[in-house]
């Protein structure tokens, strides 16, 4: 009845521009507020306190503490949306609106991350209940300057759980939270190099992900690669990094002469045939065994097959070994390679008896097969052996043998060997008394074919053999032939390629080298400033933990 009376009054006194429906809605809303302002026993209650209670806050001190935090928040967020600012201001001045939590989140969302965590921490300390329990825990830790593992007590599983930004931040600080390679990889381009080093030290990145590709600074990329994949570091990389040990490692492997008393200097001397007594103490047990095998083999001229198979060791084996007699070339490809060089040195020394004995061993190897049934010698070595055999066959005037050795299709296909074959055939057709000396005059002087310094060598040799008429005559014959030679003059060339005397491997063996270790860390310990990027990412995730409470049952009933 009272309601009908009131509505009748309302119809007779509506303000201009206000419809009856609007007036009824406003009247009912006002009545709901009046009813909400009374307790069940009908007494008037503090509407502001009730509004705060609906938002989860109780007690005058708590509310006043939060209001101080909200005032500070307003000062820190001048660029926040105006409606959010008004909502917060009204809460400070009078009763809070149900949208206050949403407005607070709006103010926080426009602030820099570090200010967000400072403001959030103050609000939580003041009693603000709108963060989840996990959000409150995260806020507590993010407000700390550098909460690394060891600086604080181990975190519980509840603390370790969270979004990828939070977990990456904790992981970088050393806490045992679970992160994926992709989550860490997304941060590699953004964090300082010191933090990348932390991630490497913690085992959170490895070479499989190739994180060095993610650094925009190329020099930093090389550094990260050296820390994770030292086997990929070239000599140029090592020089750029000023990594002296890696530079010396590359220099040794490239065959360079290195002095000094470190492992590389001692190994260089080993490759020259000198065994430093201190070397053994620098080697691991299995390497000591290898060194023993190398030295013992040099005494008997035989080595385990696994040593022979390591072509990078051939230079050291050759330097340690001084054969006392003709080498059994068919024992292995190494013996054939070394026998070829020894035969050539005999030729240069004019010791044709020893050269002939050695070339016979080489020709036997040229017909031998290995344990798999294939030819023992490769095509290049095969051609060199037969070419050298043909050269020495001329000494005893066995021209038919020389032609047979050179006419083999795998030999004659070489251009120089074909020229040698033509020379021997021409010699066969020449009368014996009209034939030139069979030797290549360069080789007769102890020089490689085509050596431009033959005149100086000739004069030096004459001084050495003065008084030995036979040797003087031989040297003079060689000098005369070279002096009379023209650009069209041809001599029998041995070897076909001087590269045949080089070890087949491009570099020395790594078998005796120290293990390849990553580059030690060079950056200083990370500071709180270095973790700023990861910390800010974790702070940004906090707003997702900001929950707006639903309307209370009392408010819903009042509005109805």
Image (cartoon, rainbow, N blue to C red):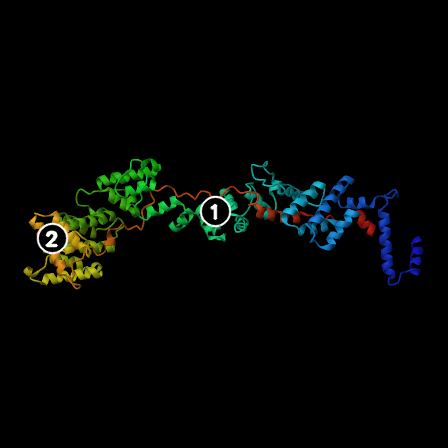
- In the depicted structure, whether residue 19 falls above or below residue 195: below
Q: Residue at x 86, y 45 (%)?
A: 38
Q: Residue at x 87, y 44 (%)?
A: 44
Name the side, left or right, on which 509 lies relative to 205: left
Name the side, left or right, on which 198 lies relative to 135: left
Q: Residue at x 86, y 60 (%)?
A: 21
Which x, y percent locates residue 389?
Answer: 16, 54
Q: Which mark is residue 206?
A: 1
Residue 352 visible to an observer of this rendering: no
Q: Residues within 10 Å of mark 2 (few under 14, many from 20)?
A: many
Q: Secondary structure at mark 1?
A: loop
Res 82 quadrant in image = bottom right
Going from the N terminus, do you reach mark 2 or mark 1 first?
A: 1
Name the side, left or right, on which 259 lies relative to 34: left
Q: Are marks 2 and 1 in contact (CB under 8 Å)?
A: no
Name the side, left or right, on which 484 lies relative to 91: left
Residue 559 visible to an observer of this rendering: yes
Q: Secondary structure at mark 2?
A: helix
Q: Nearer the viewer, residue 152 or 154?
A: 152
Look at mark 2 in the image and give the residue it sits on.
475
């Amino acid at each position: 009845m009272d309601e009908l009376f009131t509505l009748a009054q309302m119809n007779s006194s509506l303000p201009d521009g206000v419809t009856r429906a609007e007036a009824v809605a406003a009247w009912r809303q006002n009545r709901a507020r009046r009813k909400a302002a009374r307790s069940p026993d009908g007494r008037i209650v503090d509407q502001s306190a009730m509004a705060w209670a609906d938002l989860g806050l109780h007690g005058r001190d708590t509310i006043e503490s939060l209001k101080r935090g909200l005032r500070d928040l307003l000062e820190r967020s001048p660029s926040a949306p105006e409606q959010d600012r008004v909502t917060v201001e009204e809460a400070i001045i009078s009763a809070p609106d149900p949208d206050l939590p949403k407005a607070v989140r709006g103010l926080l969302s426009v602030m820099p991350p570090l200010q967000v965590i400072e403001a959030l921490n103050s609000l939580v300390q003041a009693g603000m209940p709108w963060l989840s329990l996990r959000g409150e825990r995260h806020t507590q830790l993010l407000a700390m300057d550098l909460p690394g593992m060891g600086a604080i007590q181990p975190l519980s599983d509840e603390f370790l759980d969270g979004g990828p930004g939070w977990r990456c931040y904790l992981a970088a600080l050393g806490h045992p939270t679970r992160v994926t390679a992709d989550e860490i990889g997304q941060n590699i381009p953004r964090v300082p190099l010191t933090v990348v080093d932390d991630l490497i030290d913690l085992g959170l990145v490895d070479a499989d992900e190739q994180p060095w590709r993610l650094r925009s600074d190329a020099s930093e990329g090389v550094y990260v690669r050296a820390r994770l994949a030292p086997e990929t570091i070239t000599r140029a990389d090592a020089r750029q990094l000023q990594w002296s040990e890696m530079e010396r490692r590359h220099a040794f492997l490239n065959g360079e002469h290195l002095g000094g008393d470190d492992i590389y200097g001692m190994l260089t001397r080993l490759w020259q045939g000198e065994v430093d007594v201190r070397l053994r103490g620098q080697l691991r047990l299995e390497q000591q065994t290898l060194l023993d095998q190398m030295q013992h083999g040099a005494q008997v001229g035989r080595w385990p097959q696994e040593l022979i198979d390591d072509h990078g060791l051939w230079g050291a084996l050759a330097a340690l070994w001084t054969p006392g007699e003709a080498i059994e070339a068919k024992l292995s490809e190494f013996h054939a390679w070394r026998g070829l060089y020894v035969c050539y040195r005999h030729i240069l020394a004019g010791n044709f008896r020893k050269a002939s004995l050695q070339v016979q061993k080489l020709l036997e190897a040229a017909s031998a097969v290995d344990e798999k049934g294939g030819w023992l010698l490769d095509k290049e070595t095969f051609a060199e052996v037969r070419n050298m055999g043909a050269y020495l066959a001329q000494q005893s005037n066995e021209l038919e043998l020389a032609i047979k050795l050179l006419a083999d299709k795998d030999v004659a296909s070489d251009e120089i060997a074909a020229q040698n074959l033509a020379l021997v055939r021409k010699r066969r057709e020449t009368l014996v008394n009209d034939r030139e000396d069979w030797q290549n005059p360069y080789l007769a002087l102890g020089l490689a074919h085509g050596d431009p310094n033959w005149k100086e060598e000739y004069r030096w040799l004459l001084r050495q053999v003065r008084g030995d008429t036979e040797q003087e005559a031989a040297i003079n014959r060689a000098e005369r032939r070279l002096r009379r030679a023209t650009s069209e003059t041809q001599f029998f060339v041995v070897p076909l390629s001087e590269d045949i005397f080089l070890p087949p491997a491009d570099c020395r063996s790594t078998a005796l080298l120290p293990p390849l270790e990553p580059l030690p860390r060079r950056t200083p310990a990370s500071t709180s400033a270095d973790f700023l990027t990861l910390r800010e990412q974790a702070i940004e995730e906090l707003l997702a933990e900001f929950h707006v409470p639903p309307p209370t049952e009392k408010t819903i009933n009042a509005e109805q």
